[in-house]
Amino acid sequence: MNQVYIVGIGMTPLGKHLDKSVKQLTGLALQAALQDADCTLEAIQSAWFANTRQGILEGQHGIRGQAALRANGVQGIPIINCDNACASSSTALNQAYAALKAEQCDVALVVGAEKMNFPEKRELMFEAFMGGMDREIAPAQLRALQALSAELPVPDTGDTGQRSIFMDSYAAMARHYMLLYGATQKQLAAVAAKNHWHSQFNPLAQYRTPMSIEEVLADKLVSWPLTRAMCAPISDGAAALIMCSERALHRFNASRAVKIRATRLATGIRRAPDDFAHHVGKLAADAAYEIAGVAPTDLDVVEVHDASAFAEIRHVENLSLCGFGEAAAMAERGETTLGGRIPVNVSGGLVSKGHPIAATGAIQIHELVTQLRGEAGARQVEGARLAAAENGGGFYDGEEAVAAVTILEKVN
């Protein structure tokens, strides 16, 4: 079998990079990955580039990868552009993996880069989120989702100000979950507080100040039950991954290589609103476990797509780390905290580390490779050998429009 490995990783700090372009962010992540892999640009045979925002915010509707990568010396090789909402760079990894498996190349580059903060284009910044939904039917889908929790008493909070429509969607999902399983706003706050505590140990995180459950609950309300501290910030940043086939592994330091056991993408199917066994994230996770030949109980560390604190609860259940309806209490008990039974989002997660849309999937992989190498410092999960990343993208009919699950293994 032609196995596929990650041999180089690099990323920028996350936050507001008002003085840097997509090209510059790309260059920083690329150089870090090349240095980590101890190789030169000439080793790269194919490249995948992920971005979602340059079209609407900068007018760069096409050839985004060619523009960003050629400016940084990548030339003469295939450059494939990938836009799959928040799962863009996970999708790019999936496609690079397939190309390496098919022996179309032996060394591949995946880059996710996003510049989301344009203070002078604030309306467009929020308008861009609509591109992750089916604009024709998204309003009706959101109303249907909100109707599922109509019986749940909701405090009269008034207008909470400008926000991403995704936070209204996550809030509606959270309320439905609360109605079904009796979860509380305090349990959502426990998830967010955990991730804000984790991120203090991540030097590349956007936020590095720990928050208590009480502080999370007291923060500005975004869309009940979600407060600002439960929601991912608008972030700029980039990440790069260098991948190789088994026959090229001898060119790199094999002792730091991490094997890709599985990468699976899924799109949702029509299902009843409470049929979570067929949630798009569960479909992707089940397929990934089958290909990897592992069980959820084999995992040592996990990164999930917590664009909101509730999303972590949903995806922990999609990964079968517990039963449906159990993840909120599981987080409150500390089982997903660093040192707990199954640490989740020790990077700080999207809510605290940051969420530069197209780069997020590659950033999750960056964290897990760091963990499997034993190089995560104060946030290291002791003895980590098997890891999984769940990365959702967009929104369609009550769930993510796409889900990507990647399983990685320490090999040395």
Image: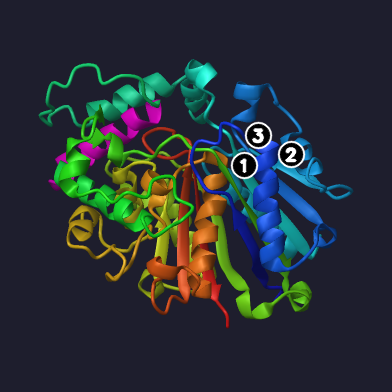
In front: label 3 or label 1: 3
Q: Is residue 187 above or below residue 382?
A: above
The local secondary structure at tag 1 comes to strand
Residue to which mark 2 is pinned: 68
Q: Residue 302, located in which quarter of the rendered image?
A: bottom left
For label 2, the crowd category at 10 Å Cα-Cα, with few meaning under 14, some 14 to 19 and many 20 or more, is: many
The quadrant in which the C terminus is found is: bottom right
Across and down, in percent, residue 341 comes to: 28, 71
Check disc 3 and give the amino acid type: Ser
Residue 171 part of the magenta-drawn span = yes
Q: Is residue 223 left or right of residue 318?
A: left
Mark toward the viewer: 2 or 3? 3
Spatial CA span between label 2 and label 3: 9 Å
Magenta region: which residues?
165-182
Q: Is residue 240 above or below residue 256?
A: above
Which of marks 2 and 1 precedes in the sequence? 2
Q: Position of residue 119 (x, y in %)?
A: 50, 22
Whole-percent x and y of residue 124?
Answer: 52, 18
Q: Which mark is residue 21?
A: 3
Q: Main secondary structure of the magenta part?
A: helix
Q: Residue at x 39, y 31 (%)?
A: 166
Q: Residue at x 28, y 62 (%)?
A: 336
Look at the image and tell me whether residue 265 can be seen.
no
- Asked whether residue 226 appears in the rendered view, the answer is yes
Element at label 3: loop
Name the residue tied to disc 1.
113
Vertical relation: 148 (above or below) 33: above
Q: Nearer the viewer, residue 235 or 110?
A: 235
Distance (Cα) linking label 3 and label 1: 10 Å
- Please report whichever mark, 2 or 3, sits nearer to the chain's N-terminal start: 3
- Label located before the other in sequence (3 or 1): 3
